[in-house]
Amino acid sequence: MFWSIFKEDLGPNFCVLRILRDAPPAHYSLRIEPFSGFTNLGIDKYESDAFDVGGYTW
């Protein structure tokens, strides 16, 4: 299985970590802690890439 890891620093206490693999995941989860950290940086929304689950594209 192939894995790719990307890290983007957003400041001294914040970063985005993305882990990609060649096989589709069995489930999806997203955790933002604390969300106020995003609003303090002027980020007011999060948009994910499209993904397929149960025959639907979200």
Image (cartoon, grey):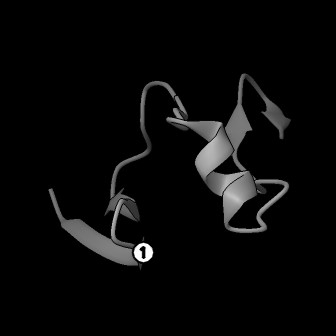
**Rendered view: 25 above or below 3:** above
**Left or right, residue 11 beside residue 46:** left
Which part of the image, by quadrant, shows the C terminus? top right
Q: Nearer the viewer, residue 19 or 11?
A: 11
Q: Position of residue 19 (x, y in %)?
A: 32, 58
**Rendered view: 33 above or below 21:** above
Mark 1: which secondary structure? strand
Asked where in the image residue 6 lies, by quadrant, the reply is bottom left
Q: Which residue does the image show at 43% across and 26% down from the upper left?
A: 26
Q: Nearer the viewer, residue 55 or 44?
A: 44
Q: Which residue does the image show at 39% across and 77% down from the upper left?
A: 8
**Left or right, residue 21 beside residue 57:** left
Q: Position of residue 41 (x, y in %)?
A: 67, 67
Which residue occupies the extreme left position in the image? Answer: 1
What amino acid type is highlighted by mark number 1?
Answer: Gly
List the residue tagged with mark 1: 11
The reply to whether residue 29 is in sight is yes
**Rendered view: 46 above or below 56:** below
Which part of the image, by quadrant, shows the N terminus? bottom left
